[in-house]
Amino acid sequence: MEKYIITLAFIAILHYPFQCFVRSLKSLLAARAMNLPIFWMPILQDGVLWQLTKRFYRPLISQLPLRLRQSEWFDLWYPDWRFVAKHELHKKYGDVFLVVSPGSLSIEVADAELAAEIITRSKYDFVKPNWPYSLLNIFGENVVSSGGATWRRHRKATASQFGSTIHKQVWRKSLILGQELLSMWTNHGATISTVPNISLDLEFLVLRVILSVGFGVTVQLNRKTHESDPPNVGGISSFAAAMEQVITNLTKLLVFPDGILKYGPSSWRSVHGSATWVRTFLENLIWTETRKQKQSLTFTGHYQEASNMLTGLVRQGICHSESQKYREKQDLLSDEEVMGNMFILAFAGTNSTADSLKYSLILMALHPDIQQWLIQDIDTAIDYDEDAANPLEWREEILLPKLIAPYCMETLRHYPPLTAINKSTGRKSQIVTLHGSPFVIPEDVNVNISLNALHHNPRYWGENALVYQPHNWDIRCKCDWPEGMDKDKDAQETLDITSRAPPVRSPVKGSYLPFSDGARGCLGKRFSQVEFVAIVTMIFRHYRIELAVGESESWEDARCRTQAILNDSASSPTLSLQRPVPLQFVRRGH
Ligand code: HEM
């Protein structure tokens, strides 16, 4: 008996490394056949374990001896290596190279033509890998986490919520909330005020926009900034605080089961309490909305006008049969799926937009000359308007085309929230075009479109690709970016003859993908752009932003400190600042 147990234990211990060895060998053979440069990695850098634990290694890794850090495989080992390396590794290995690691074969893409093909091909050719998206199902399956026919049903229901009516509400709400935030930051209009940390307030602002436009929930601004206790159950503002806590602690919720969080340390219990409260609140919202809609249908024969995204989603889900099969056949969402989508819209819409705003404000403080251009652009667009004094009269169709391309797009070129768009060939090999010839990518290969590498590839962005240069998006500006053949759809859509907006330079197709593209492209692109422009306009119409220079610091020291913080950004799960950057708001004209 003992002999059997020892043998079984021995087999169990050897099984994993043996399996890794076999799979690595298989990957290596497949990689050799592809005839592309190969990078061998001893760990699975996109694997579950590494991704979930990398924040603990990060500080340790930076303490390793320089020689070790300079070794080749370290380049890919470093968490967020795509953001750190940008296009550097591709300079060494080419715009398309392979990474072989235990049990996995990945292809890293910084070639615009190939990226465009992968992203716009049929959604069944290059699929989204299950990990890590399936982890986002904490409140129910949703449009981000699902695949295949289920995804089609979710996409149909959610995409129809993003129309011009919603975008108009986003514009209005962002202006109102932006004004409130500015007033809070500047102590109701002080000439100079220092804000030590813009991050939490911007995240809360953006969350409030989505709660309002998405769920019809209005939240006051007076929040506790460093909330460590579980929010009091019962009120709307506690729901916003709970939602914020859930979004910032998503990793904890994904990794630890309910039972562990509930009995863990107090901060874990707090997160558990927030998640439970968010679920209860969302369930109540859905239940109330469904009842309202059903009543309207019974008494008036039609549904109520959709005043927010929740109303629209609930209408998509209302069904008089409880059968799952019937729902799926009719493309309907269950209550749990409506809840999953509400959460994911709040999650997808909060961090990415808030981060792009944070980076933009900091970049403006770092580049006073560019800030001056932005202020001029805002002033000319608003002065064109008849009622310039009332922000609610500022016209979105004039401001958007002027500001999106240079400021929003250039910020996202340098700081895209996702460092890569991850796809996989799944169970079928795919034939693509690489350097003008057919090229086979075998089954089960991860295809990572590296946004940081693409967005800094000198082939598409010139030799100064690393420099922040918003005005290169203006076609009248001399620059070394090659002109793309296909005009950027969105930039062109926003051009309007009344706008006096500069014509936009189109990047080479596939070289600029912060919102991804194709069937699984971002649903909230316009939503976030409207929000971005409203908030940026509100701030710079009244204030200038400067770096808050410490007492013993020169401006140059403050600049280097700020740049170091930007360079130290990390994905958690979207790219974000790890330390605050204090900023000074100076009333314009002073
Ligand atoms: C700066 C702002 C934003 C950026 C850069 C961004 C970027 C992206 C990217 C790259 C994807 C594709 C992800 C992948 O394939 O793995 C995506 C998907 C998505 N985004 Fe955004 N996003 C932004 C804002 C928003 C907002 C405001 C919302 C909603 C209010 C939103 C909702 C979604 C949804 C629902 C998907 C999934 C689409 C699908 O899989 O069919 N995003 N976004």
Image (cartoon, rainbow, N blue to C red):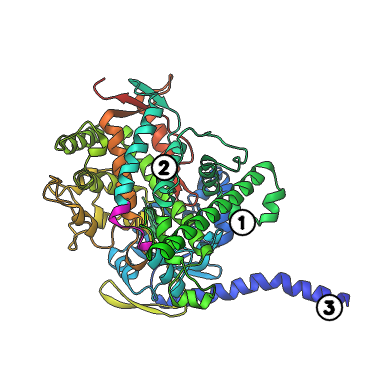
Nearer-N-terminus badge (3/2): 3
- Mark 3 element type: helix
Residue 562 percent location from the top left of the image: 40, 34
Disc number for residue 1? none
Local crowd size for mark 1, using a 10 Å CA cut-off: few (<14), some (14–19), many (≥20): few
Contact (CB < 8 A) between labels 2 and 1? no
**Region in magenta:** 158-166
- Give above or below for 319 relative to 395: below
Residue 393 percent location from the top left of the image: 23, 38
Residue carrying label 3: 4
Instruction: Give the CA separation, mark 2 to mark 1.
Output: 28 Å
Residue 456 visible to an observer of this rendering: no
The disc labelled 1 sits on which kind of residue? Val
* Magenta residue check for 581: no
Nearer-N-terminus badge (3/1): 3
Residue 22 image-quadrant placement = bottom right
- Give above or below for 120 relative to 428: above
- Mark 1 element type: helix
The disc labelled 3 sits on which kind of residue? Tyr
Nearer-N-terminus badge (2/1): 1
Residue carrying label 2: 567
Residue at position x 42%, y 57% in the image: 311
* Left or right: 463 in relation to 320: left
Using the image as rendered, state which of residue 412 and residue 137 is in the foreground.
137
Quadrant, the C terminus: top left
